[in-house]
Image (spheres, grey):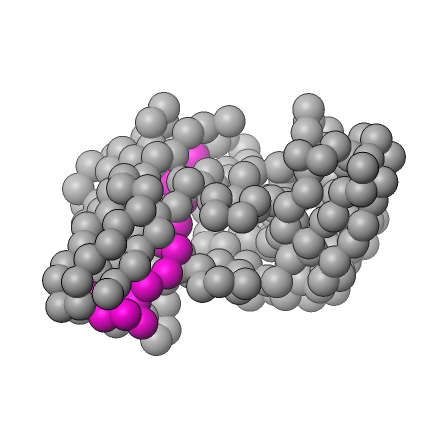
Amino acid sequence: DAKTTQPNSMESNEEEPVHLPCNHSTISGTDYIHWYRQLPSQGPEYVIHGLTSNVNNRMASLAIAEDRKSSTLILHRATLRDAAVYYCILSPTGNQFYFGTGTSLTVIP
Amino acid sequence: GAVVSQHPSWVICKSGTSVKIECRSLDFQATTMFWYRQFPKQSLMLMATSNEGSKATYEQGVEKDKFLINHASLTLSTLTVTSAHPEDSSFYICSAREPRQGGRETQYFGPGTRLLVL
């Protein structure tokens, strides 16, 4: 399974944009890039996923590098409710997810 | 997004007893569900893949006789922790794969079940 590398922790000021990076240099052509976030004592929440093109939804944007070896989750305006652990996961469609350690995001009021 | 529920949300049991956890996809049919375990301050660890109408596939190191999985319908998978011991105390989370066209499938997760074995 292709591995991902994320910073252990990041901080952001409230109402500012946040760029959460993920490196995945061994990604294969069939791997989708999935992002989830998890609050304490809750199940992970789906954020966004994509294959090659950048993706936008109401929660976030996903920017995928042209060579697909890295991606960035963009939260356009951080709120206190965005404080969570963010996981970047690679998986061919329909396959299992293997979670890494993720990035713990702290939002500063 | 799609909704996945789990029941119970928390359970306390005595050592040696068995505990059943239910995972339901509420607004879609899921031929495949997954079970994870998460210890404090750690990431989620995949335990097994549950396929409707067939045997579950367990990850390496997960005892299939201890963690019984049944996926009898397209909306329900159950995980039974048999002869539970204190070291089985953990946060158990299920997910369901939502089928989509064009290969854009993804998973939706339940809220988790906190198990404490005394």
Q: Where is residue A6, by image quadrant?
A: bottom right
Instruction: From the image, give the main secondary structure of the stretch colored magenta.
Output: strand
Residue B23 in sight here: no
Q: In screen coordinates, is B114 left or right of B43?
A: left
Which one is in front, A104 or A5?
Answer: A104
Residue B5 in sight here: yes
Which one is in front, A66 or A56?
Answer: A56
Q: How far across and down, in percent of the image, does residue B14 sit?
A: 17, 62
Q: What are the residue bounds of the magenta stretch?
A: B84-98
Q: How many marks?
A: 0
Q: In screen coordinates, is A64 left or right of B43?
A: right
Q: Where is residue A70, by image quadrant?
A: bottom right
Q: Is residue B58 above or below residue A45?
A: below
**Quarter of the figure that contains the C terminus of chain B:** bottom left
Q: Indicate whether residue A90 is drawn in magenta.
A: no
Q: Residue at x 23, y 70 (%)?
A: B85
Q: How far across and down, in percent of the image, does residue A60 sit?
A: 72, 33
Q: In screen coordinates, is A11 left or right of B65?
A: right
Q: In screen coordinates, is B102 left or right of B3?
A: right
